[in-house]
């Protein structure tokens, strides 16, 4: 089977099929190398070594969250920032898949929780989302209040990066539902939910200088749209662009349906942008 891959000139071509491991379900996350082809085995073991056993991963997540919750201690960062990577490309352009994961109803949390308790929840959330992104070859760009912005460089082709980002998004929701929420419930907290938006485009790597300090960021259509997609999502739902949908692995496309949006609500299409917004199915 061949599937379409979006080239840099936005045209579709047929590329030799790549075998992907569908990491969006626990059965797929339990690696079975005897049944996987060579690409899938290498891609799974070399790229995602920390999640070959999803149940163990969830148990480790729950342990970290519980310790932080009970002791009120700060979690030590386990990932490197993306600054070094972006510094190497400052002033240039990169094709990136951008994932924006936003905590639902955080405004209500600021009303209902003490500052210390809210800080603990936000800290647990950002830590675990960052670890998840890192495990799927993503980089964390920055934290914006109660949201985490991650990106996946398109180094080989769009299909690998798009599928990695989608798998990461499903994994994030699983970690929240099975690793974080059980700890919150045991401590008489309401469970948390997220909305996730994903898009891809060419981005400019820009560097701001303020006195002796510098700050590096990315600017492009993809990061803007990924944030806007979260506004369309229901809790624990993933919203993607048509480009992402067409470039994710066919096994992942089955988990999405097209989202119908009234033109008066959604105006972010033109003759250069393929219309179509896709939502993950309710049951994930």
Image (cartoon, rainbow, N blue to C red):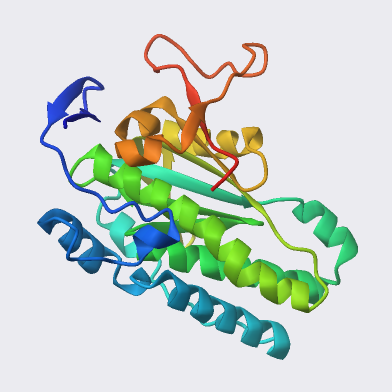
Residue 208 can be seen in this image: no
Q: In this view of the protein, which residue sits in the foreground, 165 or 56?
A: 56
Give me the residue at 84% from left, 54% from top.
108
Give the side of residue 92 with respect to residue 257, left or right: left
Q: Position of residue 213 (x, y in %)?
A: 46, 63
Residue 123, picture quadrant: bottom right
Give the side of residue 32 with respect to residue 70, left or right: left
Q: Is residue 146 above or below residue 17?
A: below
Q: How many marks?
A: 0
Give me the residue at 54% from left, 48% from top.
284
Q: In this view of the protein, which residue sits in the foreground, 169 or 219?
A: 169
Q: Residue reaching furthest right?
A: 112
Give the side of residue 95 with respect to residue 35, left or right: right
Q: Position of residue 138 (x, y in %)?
A: 36, 57
Q: Is residue 129 above or below residue 164?
A: below
Give me the residue at 26% from left, 39% from top.
159
Residue 262 can be seen in this image: yes
Give me the residue at 25% from left, 56% from top.
88
**Viewport quadrant of the N terminus:** top left
Q: Residue reaching furthest top?
A: 271
Q: Position of residue 275 (x, y in %)?
A: 45, 16
Q: Is residue 23 above or below residue 132?
A: above
Q: Is residue 239 above or below residue 65?
A: above
Q: In this view of the protein, which residue sits in the foreground, 30 or 208?
A: 30
Q: Position of residue 85 (x, y in %)?
A: 29, 59
């Amino acid at each position: 089977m061949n599937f379409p891959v979006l080239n840099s000139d936005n045209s579709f071509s047929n590329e030799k099929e790549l075998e992907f491991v569908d990491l969006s379900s626990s059965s797929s996350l339990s690696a079975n190398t005897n049944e996987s082809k060579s690409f899938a085995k290498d891609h799974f073991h070399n790229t995602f070594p920390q999640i070959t056993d999803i149940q163990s991963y969830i148990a480790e997540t729950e342990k970290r969250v519980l310790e932080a919750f009970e002791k009120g201690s700060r979690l030590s960062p386990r990932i490197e920032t993306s600054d070094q990577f972006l510094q190497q490309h400052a002033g240039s352009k990169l094709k990136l898949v951008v994932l924006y994961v936003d905590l639902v109803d955080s405004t209500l949390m600021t009303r209902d929780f003490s500052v210390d308790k809210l800080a603990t929840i936000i800290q647990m959330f950002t830590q675990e989302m960052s670890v998840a992104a890192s495990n799927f070859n993503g980089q964390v760009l920055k934290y914006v209040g109660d949201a985490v912005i991650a990106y996946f460089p398109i180094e080989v082709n769009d299909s690998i990066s798009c599928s990695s980002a989608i798998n990461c998004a499903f994994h994030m929701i699983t970690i929240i539902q099975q690793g974080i929420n059980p700890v919150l419930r045991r401590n008489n907290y309401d469970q948390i939910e997220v909305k996730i938006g994903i898009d891809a485009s060419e981005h400019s790597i820009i560097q701001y200088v303020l006195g002796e300090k510098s700050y590096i960021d990315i600017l492009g259509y993809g990061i803007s749209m990924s944030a806007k997609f979260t506004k369309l999502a229901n809790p624990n739902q993933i919203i993607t662009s048509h480009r992402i949908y067409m470039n994710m692995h066919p096994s992942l496309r089955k988990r999405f349906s097209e989202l119908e949006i009234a033109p008066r609500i959604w105006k972010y299409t033109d003759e250069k942008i393929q219309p179509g917004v896709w939502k993950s199915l309710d049951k994930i």
